[in-house]
Amino acid sequence: MPDEVYLSGGEPTTLRGITDIVSLIGSQVPINMTSNLGKSFNLDVWKREVSPEAIDCVTFSFHPTQQSWEDYSSKLKRFVRIYGGHKAGAELVMHPNQIEHEQPIRDLADELDLRTINIDIYHMQPAKFPARPGDIADRCPNENPELAKLARHAPADTSPHYCSAGVNRLNIDPIGNAYTCMSAIDRSRMFGKHSLPHYKPIGNVFDPWFRMQDEPVLC
């Protein structure tokens, strides 16, 4: 039995029967989730079908391109009235066009006594494509930590290392295929049978013989 189950995405509330999934799993294992709190998150349905006991914490990401601050904040306040601030968190990526929302989201977190608040740095992707055949493309992200307070810094050591993700945690897609991490899901779908071994699914959780990895893999 896992210690917790974390639902993320894409947007998990677009899954058919998401409230049944949360209620069923949440009755056995604490449910954590990330959501954009958009139109697919129907609070009337959640209030009716999902008890507070089924939820550990739901972190709500604010995306100004998808909804207004007024819609996001009012909906978050309603979620807290139903489930409590200790069951909710707020999240914002410090994109240059979103900096103006940092203080409002911090103030809202204090007002609602939210359990967590994530202010994430923005990674710029220059995507410098090669000018001629044989040239090397530069896709390394550039960090601008000044855009965020208490920013998360990338480790100085970027050499390959052994990752224990498949040993102590899994990422599971909607049909039950289990992967070591979210990057593995993306790369497995992108490259298919040509994926590197540690990007391929390690099994399907619905198979009776499924088990997690015994040893870390080189990543």
Image (cartoon, rainbow, N blue to C red):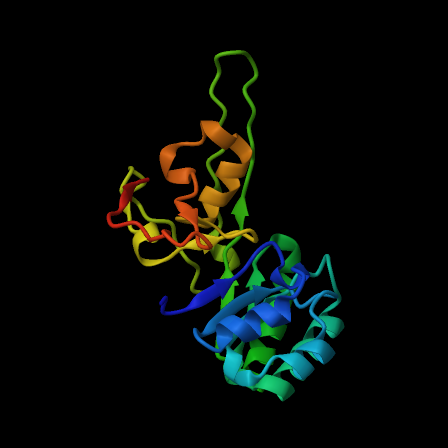
Give the quarter of the image for residue 75.
bottom right
**Vertical arrangement, residue 99 with respect to residue 139, above or below:** below
Q: Position of residue 129 (x, y in %)?
A: 56, 24
The residue lying at 49 percent from left, 37 percent from top is 188
The residue lying at 29 percent from left, 51 percent from top is 164
Left or right of residue 125, residue 44 in this image: right
The residue lying at 57 percent from left, 16 percent from top is 131
The single residue placed furthest to the top in the displayed view is 133
- Asked if residue 48 shows in the view, the reply is yes
Left or right of residue 76, residue 115 in this image: left
Q: Position of residue 60 (x, y in %)?
A: 59, 69
Viewport quadrant of the N terminus: bottom left
Q: Position of residue 44 (x, y in %)?
A: 73, 80
**Vertical arrangement, residue 197 with respect to residue 114, above or below:** above
Left or right of residue 74, residue 122 in this image: left
Q: Position of residue 120 (x, y in %)?
A: 50, 59
- Asked if residue 113 shows in the view, the reply is no
Along the viewing direction, whichever of 54 and 121 lies nearer the viewer: 54
Viewport quadrant of the C terminus: top left
